Amino acid sequence: MATTARALMKALPRATSSVRYASRSPAAKQFFQQARRNYSSESSRSSSNAKYYYAAGAGVVAFSAGYLFSNYNSDIVKTNSVGLPETHIKQGSGGQALGLFKPTTEDYQKVYNAIAKKLWEEDKYDDGSYGPVLLRLAWHASGTYDAATGTGGSNGATMRHAPEAGHGANAGLKHARDFLEPIKEAFPWISYSDLWTLAGVCAVQEMQGPTIPWRPGRQDRDNSQCTPDGRLPDGSKAHDHIRAIFGRMGFNDQEMVALSGAHALGRCHEDRSGFDGPWTFSPTVLTNDYYKLLMEEKWGWRKWVGPKQYQDVATKSLMMLPTDMALINDDKFREWVKVYADDSEKFFKDFSDVVCKLFELGVPFQSLPTDRLSFKTFDEQALGQ
Ligand code: HEM
């Protein structure tokens, strides 16, 4: 079937050929080309092409993970078994107390590596990666920000506590919080709020997205700082809702559209949001396919008993939320959807900028924007070894 969807699926390996992809090691390229698992709930309706591109490659995964990460085990084991000196714990990443130990760029890269290692090893989850749900955790921690009152945002990691943990929008994020718990144990000096945003950065980068500059300085807060329910967007709504929610955080139209490109990743789960299915054919690789599919594919209402959502007419295997469709039904949003559909590099650049901004909302940094760190992916560090 010569539909756009098929064309996009065929073009996918090229569509993901970012600068980073081009510089990947041969083992990693093999991994990215072969080790994509099929959708957990849509496989019967997926096309044969989709199966071809995202077929499971457990052996390759195991080999690649071992190859890429073997050099880093010693760091993590050493940290766990020997334990960290008390002074190490006294000065947290948020600078919450005086102490002798000040984490360096290298220390943060070690945390990044530990998350990346776990991401690659635990490939049985969902479509083969915890990456999407880690990004969603970082976004939901940050997206509670209210610029008018300065409340909410990524400072605090208040989603650890009731009532915020139980807010409907946060359903399913326990998977991500639990995933990160052993990392917090291995690196007790990092605050949860720094850890969650760093994990979001790591998820984007390890899923072949752009480098996201990041800096520490978030301090954990107790449940008195939990934000009221209703600050995160509701997928069943339209363009005015998107502008109200993201405008409250301080984003403009272009930034709202750039942020939405995150829906190239992951999927909806009936037992979490009630919605169901992935947005793209490559839910564990960041591409600009979300925009391409919005622009080029035909979308109709899915006939089912669940909440109103769209499905692609051609394969009936992809979905869009009403808020996703609002991006092409609103003229101003649509202009940006087209820009990002036509220019993957522009999307990566703008996505990096806007995610960096998102993760810094509401943080009382002592540091300057010029102090931001850029982490190397596992691939980049394995090159030449
Ligand atoms: C209008 C704005 C948005 C709405 C209404 C929305 C809504 C949703 C919904 C309903 C889900 C499915 C949750 C589930 O059932 O597991 C989801 C998943 C996801 N969202 Fe959004 N979202 C929005 C913006 C964003 C932004 C700004 C980001 C990140 C920058 C993001 C990243 C993700 C990711 C990565 C997933 C997949 C999670 C997974 O696979 O477990 N979303 N979103």
Image (spheres, rainbow, N blue to C red):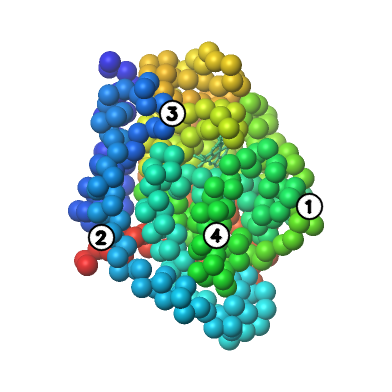
Which comes sooner in the sequence, label 1 or label 3?
3
Which comes sooner in the sequence, label 4 or label 1?
1
Ligand 1, what quadrant?
A: top right
User: Spatial distance from mark 2 to mark 4, Cα to Cα?
Assistant: 25 Å
Q: Amino acid at mark 3?
A: Ser
Name the foreground residue: 372 vs 342.
372
Which comes sooner in the sequence, label 2 or label 3?
3
Q: Which residue is mark 2?
A: 67
For label 4, the SS is: helix
Q: Amino acid at mark 4?
A: Glu
For label 3, the SS is: loop
Describe residue 65's horizontal placement relative to residue 238 as left or right: left
Can you say which quadrant of the picture contains the C terminus?
Answer: bottom left
Tell me: is circle 2 under 8 Å from ligand 1: no
Give the crowd class for mark 2: few <14, some 14-19, many >=20 residues within 10 Å.
Answer: some
User: Spatial distance from mark 1 to mark 2, Cα to Cα?
Assistant: 48 Å
Q: Position of residue 336 (x, y in %)?
A: 50, 34
Residue sitting at x 53%, y 33%: 269
Q: Are marks 2 and 4 in contact (CB under 8 Å)?
A: no
Which comes sooner in the sequence, label 2 or label 4?
2
Q: Which residue is mark 4?
A: 181
Residue sitting at x 48%, y 25%: 319
For label 2, the SS is: helix
Q: Which residue is mark 1?
A: 149
Which comes sooner in the sequence, label 3 or label 4?
3
Q: Amino acid at mark 1?
A: Thr
Describe residue 298's horizontal placement relative to residue 151 as left or right: left
